[in-house]
Image (spheres, helix red, strand yellow):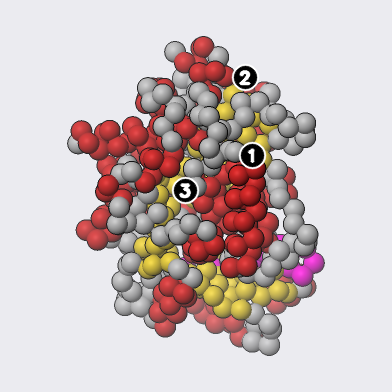
Amino acid sequence: MKAAHITNRSKLSCLSSLTANAPAKSTSKKPHMACRIFPKPSSSTLAAASSSGFDFPLANSITSNEDHHNGFDVLGLGQAMIDYSVPASDDFLHQQLDVPKGARKIICLEERARILELLQNSDYSIASGGSLSNTLIALARLGAAGADIRIAMAGLIGGDALGAFYTAQMASAGVDVISPLNIEANTGTVVVVTSQQDAQRTMLSYLGTPAAIPITTQLKTAIANSKIIVIEGYLWELPDAQNTIIEAINVAREAGTIIAMTVGDAGVAERHGAGMWTAIEQGVDLLFSNKTEAKALLASIPQSKHNNNSNDRRNKGALDGCRTTTEATALALAPHCPIVVVTDGSHGSIITALGQLHVVPPHWGPSKPIDTCGAGDAYCAGMLWGLLRSRDVVSMGRAGARVASAVIARQGGTLSEEAAQCIVEEMTHSSNSSGNDNGDRRRVWRSMAPESLLE
């Protein structure tokens, strides 16, 4: 237990070092980049972070632990899905599918058969998909384009032909699937219909056969030997999900593995908000959401967390100074998790990290958006890639925006190998030019935060 405690403090100190290279105030003359102080995290988080000295390099924290020597850089925990991606007119959505544009609708097996029959004469693609898969494939391709990154997926994989197809597709993309096929389960599918008018996505999801994911000895070992674990938000839809997720978090905390969690979508937060808050308080280090999901999560916060939050007055003062609702939403989540990411489409993203708020603009490529499906998944991949490369938090956000931009410029939710190569070359050149990776580790919290926040 003593060794695990030291490991967890090292993990927290590495997270606090993410702000070390990020400017305490925006040094750019451009108005779209900003950084401000927000109310402090919980007292235990602050105590552990402030005692670390703020000069613990992130790279050391995720590579020096001997327990991680033969494990994975990133392990995803979620459900295997197959994506059917098709472009269609708005009239097709309304008249044939009877679903509002931009919605996510849960369908049954019979409805899926009817929809696929309607698409028989359309130009559609089939690929391993789902939110987690998109993130892991993008990470694997970024790794293949630069320093090798070891990526794995564990969770629920159906024992049907689609499950075998999923496993083969992930392997070909460089992602190890370490969980066995569940012969009693059908693989879930998502029919992603992309509007030909504005590239907005509509999702028709068949969740597959619901089955619990057991935390086996093999899975515990994989979690403990990984640098980062990513818990997919849609995992909350499976039976006994809360026990599965909490147990995975406990194993990760014991081993010092960094814990990231995605919200999934607003509906997941509405249905499972109480469980999500339990997981967040249990020890989530990075929380990924978009603005709508973040608002839904805040709407489900237990009343006890309102009553027991000693930062309410400071939060109110900070929220009064927000320029956008996205900033206010991110700030409201900030005291509960060391790093919070809230994406806001074409408006960019907000990142709160251990005492600072960063506004990261979107990245606009030469091509207009074709398919927005997977933009958030791609952002998550880019940010985790930056984390593995020891980037500061703003550079991590820029990497996320860059990967998201590449994904929405093509059909489907995955990052292409060619785009991954370009991104790694561009980001590496940018880093070498600015010296972000090797610059001095400034003690941002103590130099910038008011003394009242350090009490």
**Amino acid identity at mark 3:** Leu
Q: Distance between the residues labelled 2 and 1?
A: 35 Å
Q: Name the residue under label 2.
A: 317
Task: Name the quarter where the C terminus is drawn.
Answer: top left
Check whether the beta carbons of the residues at disc 3 and disc 1 lie within 8 A of each other: no
Q: Distance between the residues labelled 3 and 1?
A: 18 Å
Residue at 54% across, 75% down: 127
Q: Nearer the viewer, residue 382 or 203?
A: 382
Name the element at disc 3: helix
**Amino acid identity at mark 1:** Ser
Which percent across, then down, holds residue 256?
32, 42
Residue 161 against residue 386 in the figure, above or below = below
**Residue count near mark 1 (Cα–Cα under 10 Å), binned few <14, some 14–19, many ≥20:** few
Q: Say which label, 3 or 2, has the lower sequence index.
A: 2
Disc number placed over residue 434 in the picture, else none: 1
View extreme (bottom): residue: 121
Residue 156 against residue 353 in the figure, above or below = below
Q: Say which label, 2 or 1, has the lower sequence index.
A: 2
Q: Mark 3 points at which residue?
A: 388
User: Is residue 318 toward the left or the right of residue 43 in the image?
Assistant: right
Residue at 57% across, 19% down: 448
Residue at 65% across, 43% down: 433
**Residue range highlighted in magenta:** 195-207
**Amino acid identity at mark 2:** Gly
Query: Does the image show residue 275?
Result: no
Closer to viewer: mark 2 or mark 1:
1
